[in-house]
Amino acid sequence: MSDKLKIGFYWCAACGGCEISVLDIDEMILDVVELADIVFWPCAMDPKYEDLRAMEDGSIDVIFINGSIRSTENEEMVKLLREKSKKVVAYGSCSSIGGLFGLGNLYSKEELLEYGYNTPSTEEGGVIPAENSKVPEGELHLPPLLHHVRSLDEIIEVDIYLPGCPPLPNQLKEGLPLILEGKVGKYDLVSQKSVCDECPLEREEKKIPRLYPIQEMMLDPERCILDQGVLCMGPATAGMCEAPCPSVGHPCIGCNGPVRGVKDQGARMASALASVLGVEGEERMEESEIIDVVKSVRDPTGSFYRFSLPKSYLRYKRRDIHG
Ligand code: SF4
Ligand code: SF4
Ligand code: SF4
């Protein structure tokens, strides 16, 4: 019997980008195959639920789980995978911090279903999520949605976090061997440095009067984007990606989530912006000036928490709902 490691991949509520990213490591995939056998990968191998249930507990050495937890099926599967696996890696930002789909937490499940499924393509005979786990006999439904999106660690214990949307080849080339050789701790792959620390554009930390939409600006590609008055999430975002977005003139949108040790990416960004916009010296400003400055931050929740709402202090809008 092979003495290689046994690894697996699983996607929950995901876009597919994380699954594809595994292939972005080019020839390094050969090193992975040298070290490990892939024993579970629904995207590529089409195993059935029964196949997983039949595996011995702890028989997968490392399972890489991507995607948010959105449905009862996601919840059930990750609990099962936790039993079958020695180590669980939260792969990608959806899994680590809730991800893009976490913005659904600004609405109730009922509002989302109404908006997303009441469309011409679902009016007649469309397959929609069941309202609860009791799917009527003979009817085809998608698994029921949970009331809000969760990160993986709200459901099961996570051993290693590897955020990114998706994790980039440089992160994988550094992180994958360490994970497979068991040389990495829970948060070791989450940078303590921010994107600003890795950004080639130098920040002068100038005070700016307000923020401007990027489409209204002719940005100087040599200067810090935030210094020029356009929102860039670099100060509040973990920097293990090596800042590819600001390097080509696009603001960081925060996809890695917060730097290691910071719980709330949005709060960190609000604090950074308060300083840049001069709101910290608000006692010297007219009330109308403060209101103008604050209004110039468009869609603060969607911008500050684009990838991390389920893992933030806010988590979801309707605190009266559980499930
Ligand atoms: S982290 Fe990004 S790439 Fe990965 S599943 Fe989520 S949205 Fe897709
Ligand atoms: S462009 Fe963005 S990431 Fe780069 S230094 Fe400025 S704020 Fe930081
Ligand atoms: S610069 Fe920001 S948006 Fe771009 S990959 Fe890095 S964390 Fe993500």
Image (cartoon, helix red, strand yellow):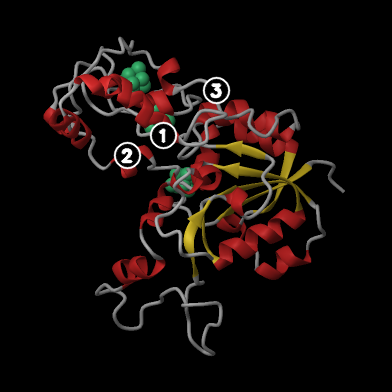
Could you give the CA–CA distance between mark 2 and mark 3, rounded to whole angstroms? 21 Å
Could you give the CA–CA distance between mark 2 and mark 1, rounded to whole angstroms? 12 Å
Quarter of the image where one finds residue 200: top left
Q: Which mark is residue 249?
A: none
Query: Which residue position holds label 2?
Result: 303
Q: Nearer the viewer, residue 301 or 73?
A: 301
- In the image: residue 106, left or right of residue 281: right
- In the image: residue 196, left or right of residue 176: left
Residue 68: % across, % down: 51, 53
Which comes sooner in the sequence, label 1 or label 3?
A: 3
Binning the other alpha carbons within 10 Å of mark 2 as few (below 14), some (14 to 19) or many (20 upward) gives some
Residue type, mark 1 in image: Ala
Residue 266: % across, % down: 40, 36
Binning the other alpha carbons within 10 Å of mark 1 as few (below 14), some (14 to 19) or many (20 upward) gives some
Residue depicted at 51% across the width and 43% down the height: 97
Task: Name the secondary structure under disc 2.
Answer: helix
Residue type, mark 2 in image: Ser
Q: Nearer the viewer, mark 1 or mark 3?
A: 1
Residue 144 in sight: yes
Farthest residue, direction bottom: 137
Query: Which residue position holds label 3?
Result: 192
Residue type, mark 3 in image: Gln
Query: Which residue position holds label 1?
Result: 267
Residue depicted at 23% across the width and 35% down the height: 297
- Marks 2 and 1 in Cβ contact (< 8 Å): no
- In the image: residue 279, left or right of residue 213: right
Which comes sooner in the sequence, label 2 or label 3?
A: 3
- In the image: residue 309, left or right of residue 41: left
